[in-house]
Image (cartoon, rainbow, N blue to C red):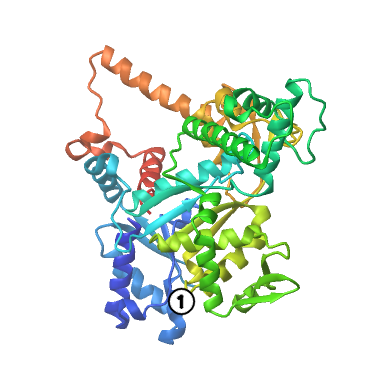
Amino acid sequence: MKGKLRKILFDGIQKHFGLIEQQIPDISLEIPNQQVHGDFASNAAMVLARPLRRSPIDIARNLVDYLNESDLVDRVELAGPGFINIFVRKEAWYETLVHIARQKEHYGQQANDSTQNVLIEFVSANPTGPLHFGHGRGAVVGDVLANLLESQGHRVTREYYVNDAGLQVRNLARSVVYHLLAGHGVEIDFPADGYRGEYVKTIAEQLPKDLVEFVPNEPTEDQIQGIESFAIGCMLENIKEVLDLCGICMQKYSSERELVESGRVGQMFTELESRGVLEKRDGATWFASDRFGDEKPRVLIKSDASHTYFATDIAYHFDKIKRGYEKLINIWGADHDGYVARVKASLQALDTSPDVLEVILLQMVSLSRDGTPVVMSKRGGHVITLREVIEEVGRDATRFFFLMRKPDSQMEFDLELAKRKSMDNPVYYVQYGHARLTSILAKASDNQLEVPLLSDAPRIDLSLLDLPEELGIIKKMNAFED
């Protein structure tokens, strides 16, 4: 409906004022907050006043007369300094139901002239522990965004970036070694920055024989690398299981370790060096990211010759571009806000538009029971996992709750509310509505009453749907495509 009315509005502007579409400024056609202001309202007259050098009221009167001639329009009202309020005929709204009936499950899905290869990277939690409930927000937002883009014809890949290199996974391996040795009576200090969760002990118990031959001695470097790889594999299997419980299937898990070992990080350094944006000082290698909008240069290789996380992140994003993706979407926690500019700077330095990357920052989500906060400590091992939340409240409720607030707003996830069988729980409200409708259809069938369904819309008398509530539902259905 909005598209049809916009075309009529533009046709009226062309007819009365001689402007073609390319000459028309950006005008709005929106659904007003209050029904008394019509089904749609436009500021076209006020926007056109300056380029046409005519009063908004004079412009609006011409457009009102033109719109009133349309079969879609019931009436048009002029409001305030030149707002155009459009009321659509009931019969025109009924066409929405016919359109939906013909489209069936494809309603809202449409081909796009500018479809792209899109990579959405989300979750990407370190494989040093199970996904906690907070990871669920990024998981659900990323998956739903991927669904939405796919419905508009884009080719979407869901990707998880596995940080399987560096100090954190080494600390996981040392935590496993601690449990292994302690289990054999060896007195050993728990490693600083180690992981205390019960899952670490479980990994230690599952280690294959060839990885425990060193007991009761300390492991060699090769042995600890083997334990590290085994532990990462265990955690990734756990993560995949939980994402599956949440209804999410990642197409690709991209490994930081593989990125380094394949030489792609080295290739990235060669590219940056050839562009003259690397500087060596104080024994370190710096990227001149301040030349590309970042606030200051960034270290890529430290004085001890080790890479920073940023170095591998540049290589990872460069690799995404080389794989042929035209749009990159990252879903990160809000604590990564300052990281966005430097990653965009690295893309620009590598001759890629920074606009290729879009970052959605997620604000913090807290967990509660009946309004009482649930306190967690990941390193202390006191964590509510995403698996526990899904198993307690169900997949649908979990996904629904994570989508009830915009990503850029903080939210509270109340476990008891999500399970409550009352109208206070929005998930229950929706499920109750579905159950009631199903019951009505079943009762009609038991009484041999024919109930017209949406699929019958093209051949039944839709004028019977004249209550404000009925028309309101149709209007909401119509807005879905837009």
Which residue matches tag 1?
A: 47
Up the image or down, 87 lies above or below 293; here it is above
Q: How many marks?
A: 1
Q: Farthest residue to the bottom: give it.
A: 53
Please tell me in which quadrant of the rendered image residue 186 appears. Answer: top right
- Residue toward you, 316 or 421: 316
Up the image or down, 250 lies above or below 333; here it is above
Residue type (three-letter) at the residue carrying disc 1? Val
Q: Percent from the top left, x then y, of residue 429?
A: 51, 28
Q: Quarter holding the C terminus?
A: bottom left
Q: Percent from the top left, x then y, of residue 144?
A: 46, 44
- Residue toward you, 69 or 322: 322
Please tell me in which quadrant of the rendered image residue 375 appears. Answer: top right
Q: Residue at x 56, y 63 (%)?
A: 314
Q: Percent from the top left, x then y, of residue 101?
A: 24, 40
Would you say residue 424 is visible in this rendering? Answer: no
Would you say residue 14 is visible in this rendering? Answer: yes
Q: Farthest residue to the left: give it.
A: 459
Q: Residue at x 30, y 79 (%)?
A: 20
Q: Percent from the top left, x then y, of residue 128?
A: 64, 39
Q: Residue at x 80, y 40 (%)?
A: 192
Q: Is residue 411 left or right of residue 36?
A: right
Q: Say which element carries label 1.
A: helix
Up the image or down, 14 lies above or below 149; here it is below
Up the image or down, 472 lies above or below 294; here it is above
Q: Residue at x 76, y 73 (%)?
A: 282
